[in-house]
Amino acid sequence: MATGNTAHYDSDTILPQPFALSIVQYDGDSGFYLFYLDESGKEQTDTYHESIEGAFKQAEFEFGVKKEDWIKL
């Protein structure tokens, strides 16, 4: 559930609350992306973080998702 601490926009329109979140690190990239996904798994937006801890903290700040709530796939 969104905390209301942030809002993401597409032009002038506020994006809906994501259906799911995902944290991804690409080969050769030292940082981590927190992806905000819709019901079909399509990316709505993302944030970039220097560490996985930063991505976890952002997810908790925005949605109350704690580090221990994540499932590694």
Image (cartoon, helix red, strand yellow):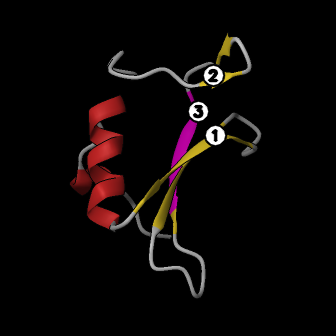
Instruction: Give x and y (percent) for residue 54.
Output: 30, 56
Residue shown at 33%/43% (left/top)?
A: 58
Sequence-first disc among 3 and 2: 2
Q: What amino acid type should be assigned to the residue bearing mark 2?
A: Tyr
Give the tally of numbered discs.
Answer: 3
Q: Which residue is mark 2?
A: 9
Most common SS among magenta residues: strand
Asked if one can make out residue 10 in the rendered structure from this viewpoint, the answer is yes
Give the number of the disc on residue 45. Answer: 1
Contact? badges 3 and 2 (CB < 8 Å): no
Q: Alpha carbon of mark 1 to alpha carbon of mark 2: how far?
A: 9 Å
**Image quadrant occupied by the N terminus:** top left
| On screen, residue 36 above or below 15 | below
Sequence-first disc among 1 and 2: 2
Residue shown at 58%/46% (left/top)?
A: 46
Q: What amino acid type should be assigned to the residue bearing mark 3?
A: Phe
Q: Which residue is mark 3?
A: 19
Contact? badges 3 and 1 (CB < 8 Å): no
Instruction: Give x and y (percent) for residue 53.
Output: 26, 62
Instruction: Give x and y (percent) for residue 72.
Output: 42, 68
Left or right of residue 57: residue 22: right
Contact? badges 1 and 2 (CB < 8 Å): no
| On screen, residue 8 above or below 30 | above
Q: What amino acid type should be assigned to the residue bearing mark 1?
A: Thr
Task: Provide the residue span drawn in magenta.
Answer: 18-23
Q: Residues within 10 Å of mark 2 (few under 14, many from 20)?
A: few
Residue shown at 51%/45% (left/top)?
A: 21
Label 1's element?
A: strand
In the figure, residue 2 lies in which quadrant?
Answer: top left
Residue 8 drawn in magenta: no
Left or right of residue 27: residue 67: left
